[in-house]
Every structure is written in C-alpha cells, then in structure tokens.
Image (cartoon, rainbow, N blue to C red):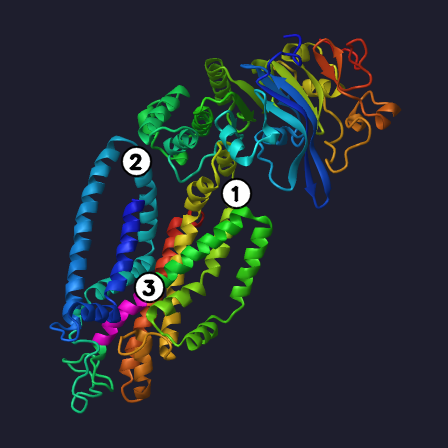
Amino acid sequence: MILGLFGLLVGLAGWHAGTLWDTLAHTLEKLFGANVPYTLRDLDFLVSTLFLLGMLAALVLYSGLSCQRIRQADRTAQGPERQWSIVKRQFLKNRLAVAGALIILALYLVAFLCPFLAPYDPVEQGDRVQERLLSPSAEHLLGTDRFARDVFSRIIYGSRISLLVGFLAMGLAVTLGTAVGAVAGYYGGWVDSVIMRFVDMMLSFPTLILIITVIALWRNQSIWIIITLIGLMSWMGVARLVRGQFMALKEREFFQAARALGAGTGRLIFQHLLPNSLTPIIVSATLRVGNTILLEASLSYLGLGVQPPTPSWGNIVYDTKGNLFTEWWMPLAAGMAIVITVVGYNLLGDGLRDALDPRLRE
Amino acid sequence: MTDVMDQTSPQIEVRNLKTYFYTEDGVVRAVDGLSYRLAKGETLALVGESGCGKSVSALSVMRLIASPGKIVEGEIRLDGLDLLQCSETEMREVRGNRISMIFQEPMTSLNPVFTIGNQIMEAILVHQDVSRKEARDRTIAMIRRVKISAAETRVDEYPHQMSGGMRQRVMIAMALACNPEVLIADEPTTALDVTIQAQIMELLAELQSEFQMSILLITHNLGLVAEVSDQVAVMYASKVVEHTSTAELFASPLHPYTHGLLTSVPTLGMSKEQKLNVIPGQVPNPLHFPTGCRFHPRCPVAEQRCKQEEPLLREVKPGHWAACHFIENGKSPIKGADR
C-alpha cells in the first residue's frame, strides 16, 4: 500500500511538471525546432490523454491487486482493513470533510482535463479590436481580458499552477520539516537547542517580504524557484510538530523496547518514530497546502510569481485588476477559485485530523 | 546452592555497579555498588520498593542509561566480555541477541502501527542474516512457542487486537527470538491479572529450561520470588541489603528491612483483626540519603552507631550476605525473625 501511495505521489508530481505550459512549450521547441507543426494545445491533449490512460491502467491494476489481497485477508485476520474502515467511516460522517475532499477531487479532475474542458487556448490572443474585454456570453463564459484571451479558459488552466504549487511546495516543506524535526527530536540535547533556535529565527522572518527580496535579487521568476522558496519558508511548523512528536514517542515504552532489541538509529527513526508520527504530519501537510497556494497567489498578484502569459489565478487577478469596476467578474472569478481551493484543502485537513485522531472521537 | 556468590563460571557478572544521575538538583545515586553473579540457567530476583534502583540497574546492564544518567563505576561481564568497554555498535550486537529484556507494560511496549509478526521478525532480522521468508517462518514458530493459538493468523494481527497477557507473550517471543543467554524481566507480570501472571511465569520457567538462559527478575512481588528464583537480592535505597538463596531468605531473613518486607505481605487465612506489619516512614529521597545505614530512620533496632557508620555487605553466614551491624552468629537482631 505504501508503495502504491508513493507511486501515486510521484506520478502526480510528474504530471504536474509535465503539463506546465512553459514545460510544454519547451518540449515542443526541442521536438520540432522552429517550425512547429502542432500547437501547445495539441501537445497538452496528448500528455493529458496519456496520463489519464496511465492513471486508469494503474487503477485497474491496483484494484485487481487489492481484490486479491482482500480475498487473502478474508482467510486471515482483518487488521489493517478494520483500522482503515474506522477512519473511513469517521471521515464520511463529517459532511464538511467530504465536501472538502470532493472539492479537491473536482479540482484535480479539472486540472487533468484542462484541454477538454477549456473552450479556448489560454494564451492565444484573439482579435485585439473586436474581441477585447467582451462581456460574458455563451461563447466566452467569463468574457475576455484586455489581451482578448478567454478568461474562463485561463481560470481552468490556472488550476494547474495552484495545484502544482500547493502540492510541490507542501511536499518540500513537509520533507524538510520532517527531516529537521526528526534530527532535533531524536538527538535532543544541544543538537535540538541549536536546531530549534534556528527554527525560531526562521519563523520570525516575514515570509512574503523575504521571498520578494530573494526574487528581486535573483531576477529569475521561474515557477520552480518560487515553489522552492515557498517550500523553504514554510517547513518550520512541520519541524516543530515532528520534533514534539518524536520527543513524546521516545518516552514510550515500545521505543525503549526496540532499543533493548538492538535496533540502530535508522531503524528506530524509520520503523518506530516516523510511522507513529505520520498522522499529524499528514494532517498538517493538508492544512499547509492552503497556505502555500495563497502565498503563490499573493506573489503572482504582485507580479513576482508565475509570469504571463502562463495563467495562474494570482496573475489573472493582477491582469484584470484594472477592470475591477467595469469587468468585475474576471478578478472575482479568479479570486473565488483561490478561495474555494483553499477552503477545500482546509476542510479536508480538518476532517482528516478528526478522523485520524482517536482522541477526538466521541 | 549454598555458595551463591562463588560459582566458577558465571554467565553474567556485575561488580560494584554505580549508576548516577546528574540532575540540576544534585546527584541521584540510583544504583550504588551493586554486585551479583548469575550462572547459566539460574534466576536471580532483584527485590525492592519502587525507586530503589532495580530498573536502573537492569537498564545499566543493557547500557541503555540516557543522559543525565551515567554508569560511573563498575564492571559488567557477559561470559567474560566486559560490556562497559564495548562500543555502541558492539552493544547493539549484544542487545536483543545475547541479552534481552521484557518490560512492565505489555500494553505500551509494542509499536502500535506494525503487526506483531513484523515486530518479532524485526528482532530476528536485526541480528541474523536470514531471508524474510525464513524470518517469518521462525516468527510463527516463536509465536507457537509462547503458546499463542492460531499462530499463522495471529502473526498478522496488530497489538491493539490482543489482550495484555497475549501482548506480554509477544514481548517474550520478541525477546527470545534470537536465543539470548540472559533475559532481564523488569516486573513482567505487574500489569497483568493474577491468573495471567501465573501463566506467564510458568511460560518463562518452561522457556528458561528449554533455552538454558539466565534470568534477572526484577520485581516487588515476593510471592513470585519464592516460586521461581534461585537467589534473591534485596535492594534498599540503591544498595543491596541482603543477598542469599531464595530458600534461605524465606527461612531466615536477617536484615531488618527484609524482615519488614516479608511480614508486610498478607497471607491467606489472615483474620480481619490481624494487622499487617507496616514499615514506618518513607523511602528516603535519593538526593539526600540518610548518613550511616540508609535504613536507620525506619529501622526498629537502630542505635546511635547506625547513624554514623555505614554497614558493609558481609557474609554473615555461609552463602548469606547482609548489611547490618547487629547480625551476629547468623542471627537476626529482630526477635522471632527466624522462622
């Protein structure tokens, strides 16, 4: 199961990277040189379709495997199934949590199916005279912006950026935070003091201003740099959490028992401490996604994030803020998209915490 | 079994072990000069009240004392190998392989996120170069050995699916998976029902004769001591006050503290009116042990001398060691102590 989950995460990360507009453009350029016989959208169709097929195949394979496993499990004890079914039941009881999960699921579907859902190419500019700043209509659901691009298509494609940033920046933050917190919590003593004072120091920096400074100094606004910076600025909470968890687990008797069995440092951390800290890590990771998405949107809104013409919700708001009083639906729709995503992740995180934490059960 | 301290080749020998904790309030002398020898297949019971240093002495043998604790003096020899000179890597080879330990709380001594099979397998895989398949087969055999029924299915169960007694059996299976020479049982039955206690002790005794291992049994349950151990060391305030064979100890306890302990145990058939003997006072604060004999503030026969002069553990009778000034000619200072 852990292998399957890992595969899923890697697959998602790969897809995230693969469908990015500038990555696609780059690939296209590499493949065909200057005289491109296909458009970006064609390539996007291809990648999305391939990925969908891959996911379907994985799903079929996985369900086949788990069917076999369940058949086996029927004969033996039903340990993990029972535990997971309690969590599942608890989660499904919580309507808001289910709503959050559905929102996130729907968003991912939208991001997967961008080329199928979006009626227009998100970066293609229409007739600058005839099709500029159109009001919503059947052809352009949310009208067009000042470059005569279809806003609805741009918002649909913008989901990719938000999900990508949320996913990768959170992944980086959680990995880094877990590693740092694990070292501090496991070794304790002066190692812990030094690391935690560093964490305190990092926490006292105003995140947004620091990122803006770094980007300004670097003069490079690639999405990868932004993701890295956001990740580097948001691991501290996870580190504190993991450290506390490790400290508490170290006092538990099973840890002492494992040491008495002759288990080494690696085994103690990866077999005994980390698996027992997974629940709070998952919950905080989910809750953190919302923050990273907001941070990216803020940066893009300030013009320091994802660069046009690649659409992101933050830079759509930025692009259209001049039309706020006349074409108000454009910034509003992009803003709503951000709000819905963040709320979705927070609901999901809260629900996961309630379902996974046995102490919160009645 | 007359000469308990003088066997020729002990499996494990502890000499003058001192483990201190350097806390902010001062030095806590948790174990202050403990010595014992344990032959192959023999059981030594370490008896005493809570906080007298029993568990710390066990953890010292495993070299699992964490800062601010430190083993400041002594010698621990496992079949000749001086454990205090071993590196941490060498110690890891010893732990769980040559010396194993079972703990007091079976409910919390197992990792809740792995199946019991996984955890027993871990013990095997850490120390032995075998395939996972073979380790699993051995695990199942081990589970059967500790008398858990349906071993093939229970191997995949999680700790929370088992009762306390079952979990203690799993702990025993884990501890014995690598066939250790010495087993340290730190209050193995304290958290269990009385009926389960007997089963677990019986199982341990059976496995002991099967594996020919030495057991260091740490307990405050004197009933348990009488049943299973060959020799007993009574600890009070980090020191051994009396050490002899089990039969001898129950027949003629010489130290006033041991006498107090034995008479404070209720016996079946005692009438309601009969009062239990109580040792007056409290266990001394380990930061400030009393001068002289550490038991003197609570001792019924203490005199001026006890406040100034610390009694040494001496052989008061062949094969019987005790630390009290007033034991003469192998007679207890308390009248009617010999039973």
Q: Are marks 2 and 3 in contact (CB under 8 Å)?
A: no
Q: Which mark is residue A87?
A: none
Residue displayed at 40% across by 62% down: A288
Sort mark 1 into few (<14), some (14-19) or many (20+) by Cα contacts within 10 Å.
Answer: some
Amino acid at circle 1? Lys
Identify the residue at the far front of this view: A33
Q: Nearer the viewer, residue A196 or A85?
A: A196
Sort mark 2 into few (<14), some (14-19) or many (20+) by Cα contacts within 10 Å.
Answer: some
In the rendered image, the vertical position of residue B202 relative to residue A82, given as above or below: above
Span shown in magenta: A153-164
Amino acid at circle 2? Gln
Q: Which residue is mark 2?
A: A78
Tell me the distance, in whole angstroms, between the alpha carbons under discs 1 and 3.
35 Å
Q: Which residue is mark 3?
A: A344
Q: Secondary structure at mark 3?
A: helix
Lateral position of residue A230 relative to residue B201, left or right: left
Nearer to us: label 2 or label 1: 1
Q: Can residue A134 be spotted in the picture?
A: yes
Q: Are marks 2 and 1 in contact (CB under 8 Å)?
A: no
Point out residue A50 in the picture as x, y percentages from the top left corner: 16, 59
